[in-house]
Amino acid sequence: MESITKNRQSVEALRTMVARAYGPDEVCDAGEDWFRELSDGCFNVVYRIRLRSGAQAVLKIAPPPDVEVMTYERGAMTTELEALRLVREYTKAPVPEVDFVDQSHEVCDADYFFMTYVDADNLNTVSDTLAKAESDAYAEGLGVITRELNAIPGGAFGSLTGPGDSTWRAAFLRMVEELLGDGERRGVVLPHGYDVVRDVVAADADSLEEVTEPRFVEWDLWPGNCMVRDGRIVAIIDHERAFYGDPLMEFGFAGSESSAYGDATAFTRGYGRRPLTAAERTRRRLYNLHLALVQIIETTFRAHTNTEQYEWACARLRETVALLGR
């Protein structure tokens, strides 16, 4: 997917990055078939790199510094690296290994890192070819993995890199306000007024107080961030949006309050979660409202050239505001 946040680099810069990471003997010095941009991502530019030895790696580069990103996306690569560290340390969830990190900005104007290449299919890409039983099996597997990730404890609510908030209510309200501030600053039109959205969230904020333990939340763990092979999930990718919060905010639960996000039944079964209480359903609706805001506002920050995502997400916001009683 095209986005102005993708920080593409010259061939010579890519060669220099490879030399820094793996040594000059691993740099391919002829032709341009040794690298290929992977286009599925929506934020960072990602390259598949073939080393001279024949091994393959993935290079991920943060957005250029002169491109404005949303508030919650600032420092996203640092967040991803911390998320990968936590997942490897606390779980057995399959994630790529980080080979090399460069935050010096000497080669290019942004952070970048290399990780192992995973030879597998993107679940979102192959989803249309799957029978329902296969799709359900993957969704169940994703539920199992997500529950394991959610067991990682945090010291405070919010960013993985701190300092965070002492309550989930404070952290979530700040997350929403940051989104609304981003939208107002860039003149993004919402299907409801900004103050209406603020009022809707404030009216049900008491439901957030049930959450007292900060837990690792991957948040963006949808089929597009799952790599599959031979009927198994072999890697989960793109961890830059992780935070400490309420596990119910995971994307896999979004369909419990809106069928537009899919059927959450198989995911919930794999996760091993009981049916939601009334307060939990309210929280999940607040989380769907937050998700819709992200999907609406990011279309301006990424300079989308068509309105498909914007219109779809506006429909989700109207739907969720109605479910919350406004």
Image: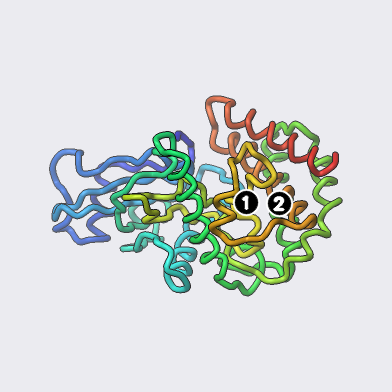
* Residue found farthest to the top: 306
> What amino acid does circle 2 point to?
Arg
x, y percentage for residue 30? 13, 42
**CB atoms of marks 2 and 1 within 8 Å:** yes
Measured in 3D between alpha carbons, the distance from the residue under mark 2 to the one under mark 1, in whole angstroms, is: 8 Å
Q: Is residue 94 something one can see in this rendering?
A: yes
Query: Dividing the image into 4 quarters, which one contains the C terminus?
Result: top right
Q: Compared to 14, does 243 lie above or below?
A: below
Tell me how many marks there are.
2
Q: Residues within 10 Å of mark 1 (few under 14, many from 20)?
A: many
Q: Residue at x 63, y 74 (%)?
A: 155
SS for dot 2: helix
Q: Residue at x 37, y 53 (%)?
A: 232
In the shown orientation, is residue 129 left or right of residue 253? Answer: left
x, y percentage for residue 205? 81, 56
The tag on residue 253 is: 1
Q: Residue at x 73, y 33 (%)?
A: 190
Q: Which residue is under mark 2?
A: 284
Instruction: Report which quarter residue 113 is drawn in.
Output: bottom left
In the shown orientation, is residue 120 left or right of residue 41? Answer: left
Instruction: Report which quarter residue 302 is drawn in.
Output: top right
In the shown orientation, is residue 217 left or right of residue 84? Answer: right
Query: Dividing the image into 4 quarters, which one contains the N terminus?
Result: top left
SS for dot 1: helix
Q: Earlier in the sequence, mark 2 or mark 1?
A: 1
> What amino acid does circle 1 point to?
Phe
Display coloring? rainbow
Q: Nearer the viewer, residue 238 or 235?
A: 235
x, y percentage for residue 211? 73, 66
